[in-house]
Image: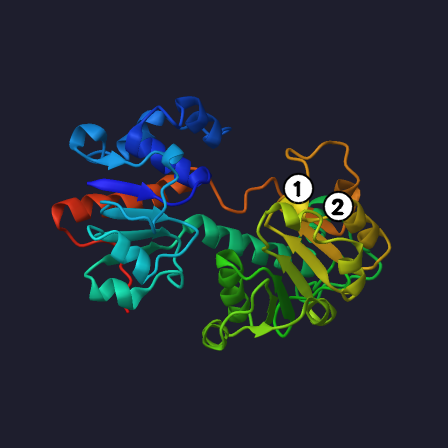
Amino acid sequence: MQIAILDDDHVIRIARYALSGPGEVSESYVRDFFLPEEMDPARVLDAGRGLHQADGVSLIPMAAKFDIRRGSDVEVIIFRRGAVDAAAMDANPKLKLIQRIGARADSIDLAAAAQRGILVSCIPRMTLQYTAEHAILMMLALSKRLIEADDSVRQGRWDRARVHPDHGVAYNWAGLSNIGGLFGKTLGIVGLGEVGSLAAGMAQAFGMRVLYCNRNRLPAAQEAKLEVEYAAIGTLLAESDFVSLHATNIPENRGLIGAETFAAMKPSAFFINTARGPIVDEDALHDALTTATIAGAGLDVHTVEPRPTPDKLATLPNVVLTPHIAGGSRKGIMLEIEAILDNCRAVLTGEPIKYQVRV
């Protein structure tokens, strides 16, 4: 069997190591990727058991820059980003499996694959689910003033003269103001990729209206399926109670969110970033938070990581900060890699694949 991987990022490189061992991806890269958690590279290599060169399986090297449209003898294509259409399938007549790392299949021509007897699998990524959950967590923590509420209970801060428990019940004895929630509120998502789409679905379960803006508007059918409304960025910022950033970390998006963004938001709105730190001008964010331009912010990602101390954003009571943990443990990526390699082994042995997508 010959396997081709179409793109390159950290997840893909770990998958490459599992298939080919030390070489174009070093053992030190694997160890460093999982730090400060410990991961034995031998476990990663074991994920590719039965798919190594000694087993008669070859992986097209990264340096070859595989072009799916030029044609080859590949039997399995693995990718995260890109597209596989009918022309690409015809250029690779031995193709048996199209394996996407991610649950969305809109970049694959499913009808063409079915006509040619090519299996398609799109695995849902636990790490993306967790990231979407974390964005919702930030919204809840800010709107319910979770950090301040927790601290007030621990420190016993309440006005003894104004709180009179009734049958042992003392509602909001800490006297917190502006306590809200998500129900009936509007969420504006900037960048409706996979994480943004997952967050949209979770927000709707809380009874939220969801607006989105994207470089490219989604087809009407997909908007209807996701139950989201397209809005120009100005409209989205003006109408949203929460603005959640899920844009791609590409050079042209650096500093995308700045003073103009925050000035266009409601004074009562909250800003959430679980995408990447450099997309946001943190000086402008600090100004917006200290001048009551916006109500608060939740940041899992930061311009500099680890975040330096002392730090001016860390001194603000209307900010929730976490240390880039939205996606959960890095070891969770191993479950995703093991799932796609299980499918590769299934193709070799003629067994059913997991997460198969049909027309």
Position of residue 169 in the picture relative to residue 122 (left or right): right
Q: Is residue 225 above or below residue 332?
A: below
Image quadrant assignment for residue 247: bottom right
| Residue at image point 41% right, 35% down | 13
CA gap between label 2 and label 1 equals: 8 Å
Circles 2, 1 touching at the beta carbon (< 8 Å): yes
Q: Residues within 10 Å of mark 2 (few under 14, many from 20)?
A: some
Q: Is residue 325 visible?
A: yes
- Identified by mark 1, the residue type is His
Instruction: Say which residue label 2 marks.
Output: 282
Residue 358 seen: no
Three-letter residue code for mark 2: Glu
Are there few (<14), some (14-19), or many (20+) residues within 10 Å of tag 1?
many
Secondary-structure class at tag 2: helix
Horizontally, residue 180 falls left or right of residue 348, namely: right
Residue 210 spot, x, y in % from top left: 59, 71
Residue 51 placement, left or right of 328: left
- Name the residue furthest left: 350
> Who's the residue at 63% across and 67% down the image?
187
Q: Earlier in the sequence, mark 2 or mark 1?
A: 2
Number of labelled discs?
A: 2
In the shown orientation, is residue 281 left or right of residue 82?
A: right
Give the labeled residue for mark 1: 302
Instruction: Single out the residue that lies furthest toward the front.
Output: 70
